[in-house]
Amino acid sequence: MRNSHLPETDRMFEQMVALCEGMPKFVNLDVVRDEHLNKQLVDRVFREALMGGDLRVLDECCAADYIDHDAGREEPTAIGRDAMRSGVEAWSRAFDMTFEPVAQLSEGNLVTTVWNWRGTQKGEFMGVAATGKTYEMSGSTTFRCQDGEITEGWWHYNPGQLQRQMGGSGSPYGS
């Protein structure tokens, strides 16, 4: 009953009522904080889209005007859901990959995931032909979430280190 007059409870109540044909009955309704819902959203993108290959998940989880930032570039690398999908497709064509979450922190509308990545190269990537070898790197991603969608993302990793592992020059964006 302590939660009965909190704004989060009222918002959740209104959302649940909108889903029902009649007035629902609630028993032991606990407030789920936005931070928890944001973590679930981010986990879904990593698990289902990035590792599972189901890119339809991006339509459900990312805003149409999503902005993606890559630490290796000065400007945003992808603007819009379709641009993000193209980036994910490029990585997926080049690697069978997994992300192992190491730690995750959610505060306000930001979710940061520290991850280890492993990918077996099956296609051309950054100018390097498929090697069939497995490569590893670590990094972090911070996503901004708003109204149940991911609106912006910042990817921090070392693409030059990955390219050097692959036998390239270590300069993924040209000499």
Image (cartoon, rainbow, N blue to C red):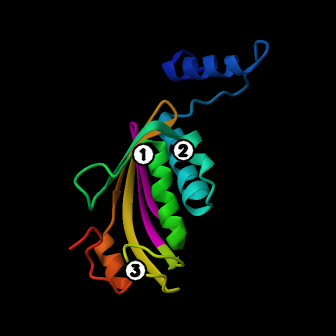
Q: Give the total number of marks visible in the rendering.
A: 3
- Taking the spot 54% from the left edge, 51% from the top edge, the residue there is 45
Location of residue 22 (image quadrant):
top right
Mark 2 lies on residue: 41
Please name the amino acid that badge 1 sits on. Answer: Ser
Dot in front, 1 or 3 = 3
Q: Which residues are magenta?
A: 101-117
Left or right, 9 with reference to 146 = right
Find numbered disc 3 in the image and state the secondary structure of the residue it sits on. Answer: loop
Along the viewing direction, whichever of 7 and 54 lies nearer the viewer: 54
Mark 1 lies on residue: 106
Sequence-first disc among 1 and 3: 1
Up-down relation of residue 166 to residue 17 (above or below): below
Indicate the position of residue 72 as horizontal and vertical percent values.
27, 62
Along the viewing direction, whichever of 20 and 8 lies nearer the viewer: 20
Please name the amino acid that badge 2 sits on. Answer: Leu
Location of residue 165 (image quadrant):
bottom left
In contact (CB < 8 Å): disc 3 and disc 2:
no
Up-down relation of residue 38 to residue 116 (above or below): above
Q: Residues within 10 Å of mark 2 (few under 14, many from 20)?
A: many
Up-down relation of residue 16 to residue 140 (above or below): above
Q: Residues within 10 Å of mark 3 (few under 14, many from 20)?
A: some
Residue 100 in view: no
Quadrant of the frame with the N terminus: top right
Indicate the position of residue 158 as horizontal and vertical percent values.
30, 70
Please name the amino acid that badge 3 sits on. Answer: Val
Dot in front, 2 or 1 = 2
- Taking the spot 33% from the left edge, 52% from the top edge, the residue there is 77
- Taking the spot 68% from the left edge, 17% from the top edge, the residue there is 18
Sequence-first disc among 3 and 2: 2
- Residue farthest toward the right in the current orientation of the protein: 22
